[in-house]
Image (cartoon, rainbow, N blue to C red):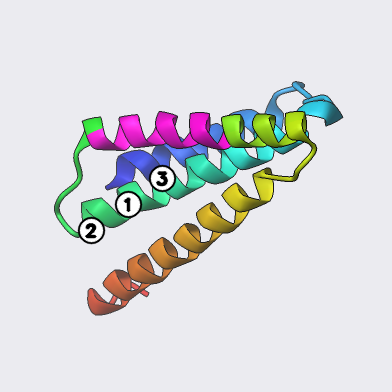
């Protein structure tokens, strides 16, 4: 359970201190990719709390979600429709659902 959290914290620290900047043209793609990655991480934490975490499922879901979100944003740009908003809504709903379930698990264990 701590591996996804450690990876998230490590990624945030590296990203915060790295001098890398993303061009404005790619900000839509990066934003939906980060949202998809966060969704996968929270889904992994939830699965670990429910004792059915599988690293193959986690990694395949992680990269598939990022790829699908990026493709959706790209296709939307090509046809002139903001399709990335569909990914933002879908992953946003899943993020809040996973976070609520994680919070309930932690409350049951009296950690929060």
Q: Which residue is mark 3?
A: 41
Residue at x-position 58% and y-position 48%: 87
Q: In the rendered view, does 1 fall on the left or right side of 65?
A: left
Q: CA distance from mark 3 to mark 1?
A: 6 Å
Q: Quadrant of residue 71?
A: top right
- Labels 2 & 1 near each other (Cβ < 8 A): yes
- Labels 3 & 1 near each other (Cβ < 8 A): yes
Q: 83 or 96, which lies in front?
A: 83
Q: In the rendered view, does 67 fall on the left or right side of 104?
A: right
Q: In the rendered view, does 47 fall on the left or right side of 18?
A: left
**Numbered-mark total:** 3
Task: State the image coordinates of residue 33 (x, y, percent, origin top left).
Answer: 58, 36
Q: CA distance from mark 2 to mark 1?
A: 6 Å
Magenta segment includes 67: yes
The local secondary structure at tag 2 comes to helix
Mark 3 surroundings: few (<14), some (14-19) or many (≥20) residues within 10 A: many
Q: From which residue to which does the magenta span run?
A: 57-69
Q: Which residue is mark 2?
A: 49
Task: State the image coordinates of residue 26 (x, y, percent, origin top left).
Answer: 76, 28
**Which secondary structure class fits the magenta region best?**
helix
Q: In the rendered view, does 42 fall on the left or right side of 38?
A: left
Residue 52, compared with residue 67, is above or below; it is below
Q: Quadrant of residue 102?
A: bottom left
Residue at x-position 61% and y-position 51%: 86
- Labels 3 & 2 near each other (Cβ < 8 A): no
The local secondary structure at tag 1 comes to helix
Q: Which residue is mark 1?
A: 45
Task: State the image coordinates of residue 51 (x, y, percent, origin top left).
Answer: 14, 54
Q: CA distance from mark 3 to mark 2?
A: 12 Å
Task: State the image coordinates of residue 95 (x, y, percent, origin top left).
Answer: 48, 58
Residue at x-position 83% and y-position 25%: 23
């Amino acid at each position: 359970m701590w591996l996804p959290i450690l990876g998230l914290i490590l990624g945030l620290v590296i990203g915060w201190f790295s001098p890398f900047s993303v061009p404005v043209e790619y900000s839509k793609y990066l934003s939906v990719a980060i949202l998809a990655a966060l969704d996968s991480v929270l889904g992994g934490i939830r699965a670990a709390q429910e004792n059915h975490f599988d690293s193959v499922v986690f990694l395949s879901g992680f990269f598939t979600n990022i790829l699908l979100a990026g493709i959706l944003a790209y296709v939307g740009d090509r046809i002139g429709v903001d399709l990335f908003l569909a990914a933002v809504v879908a992953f946003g709903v899943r993020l809040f659902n996973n976070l609520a379930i994680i919070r309930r698990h932690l409350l049951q264990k009296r950690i929060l």
